[in-house]
Image (cartoon, rainbow, N blue to C red):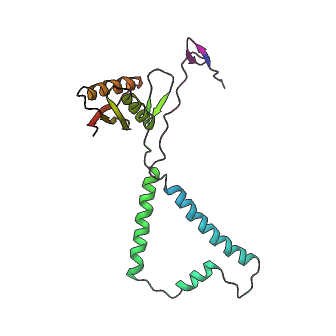
């Protein structure tokens, strides 16, 4: 078993075997099931409480008259006959389960853009939006700027003093600021005059 210890040569980090170290993978978002995970955890905790109460009553010898929450529900369902009214919720539960499975196994969205060079550094889309709006605010004639970004597109909304050349200057400055990215997104500038 060989170990690789990193060393610095000429500003680049390399391994003892001569090859450059592989950069860390880009971070990904939580995925579509990000908000469902905690919800399902709370529901599972509720099921555990019900089953725990049932086990506690049975193991502590609560006697013949002791009833559990689960026993009460089962007694209430005793005597029900099959009906179409029960088929609809069952079908909805099956479809919901399949949707949750598909969401759990779907690909997570990447929210980072790689910087030029071989350092493995990256910016998230939120950071790219901040960089774009900051670059736009530095342009003469811009009163306010906001930006939103994806991996492929940056939209900058600016409020200007009314100079017609401001929009082009904002476009150039934002593109210059984003030129540090290995695959710079397309920049769109929406300008409106201040009232």
On screen, 77 above or below 50? below
Toward which corner of the image does residue 88 lie, by quadrant? bottom left
Q: In the figure, is residue 119 to the left or right of 16? A: left
Quadrant placement of the C terminus: top left
Residue 22 included in the magenta stretch of the image: yes
Magenta region: 8-32
Viewer-proximal residue among 120 and 148: 148
124 vs 174, left or right, is: right
Q: Main secondary structure of the magenta part?
A: loop
Please indicate whether residue 55 sits to the left or right of residue 72 in the image: right
Q: Is residue 93 above or below residue 31?
A: below
Locate the N terminus by quadrant.
Answer: top right
In the rendering, at what x and y percent does residue 83 appear? 40, 83
Residue 131 horizontal/vertical position (percent): 42, 31
Q: Residue furthest left?
A: 164
Q: Position of residue 183 (x, y in %)?
A: 37, 27
Taking the spot 72% from the left edge, 87% from the top edge, the residue there is: 64
Between 27 and 93, the residue placed more toward the observer is: 27
Q: Is residue 190 magenta?
A: no
Q: Please tell me which residue is depicted at 37% across the width and 38% down the height of the picture.
A: 146
Residue at horizontal 35 percent and vertical 26 percent from the top: 139
- Depth check: give the residue in front, 96 or 168: 168
Instruction: Give the farthest residue toward the right.
Output: 60
Residue in the foreground of this view, choosing between 192 and 105: 192
Image quadrant assignment for residue 155:
top left
């Amino acid at each position: 078993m060989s170990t690789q210890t990193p060393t610095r040569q000429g500003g680049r980090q390399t391994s003892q075997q001569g090859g450059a170290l592989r950069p860390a993978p880009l971070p990904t978002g939580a995925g579509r099931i990000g908000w469902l995970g905690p919800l399902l955890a709370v529901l599972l905790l509720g099921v555990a409480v019900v089953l725990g109460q049932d086990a506690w009553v049975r193991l502590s010898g609560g006697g013949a008259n002791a009833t559990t929450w689960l026993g009460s529900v089962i007694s209430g369902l005793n005597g029900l006959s099959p009906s179409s009214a029960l088929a609809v919720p069952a079908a909805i539960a099956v479809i919901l389960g399949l949707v949750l499975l598909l969401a759990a196994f779907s690909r997570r969205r990447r929210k980072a853009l790689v910087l030029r060079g071989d350092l493995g550094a990256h910016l998230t889309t939120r950071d790219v939006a901040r960089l774009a709006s900051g670059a736009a605010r530095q342009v003469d004639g811009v009163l306010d700027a906001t930006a939103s970004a994806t991996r492929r597109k940056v939209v900058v909304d600016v409020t200007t003093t009314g100079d017609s050349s401001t929009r082009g200057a904002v476009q150039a400055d934002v593109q210059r600021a984003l030129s540090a990215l290995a695959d710079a997104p397309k920049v769109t500038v929406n300008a409106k005059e201040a009232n």
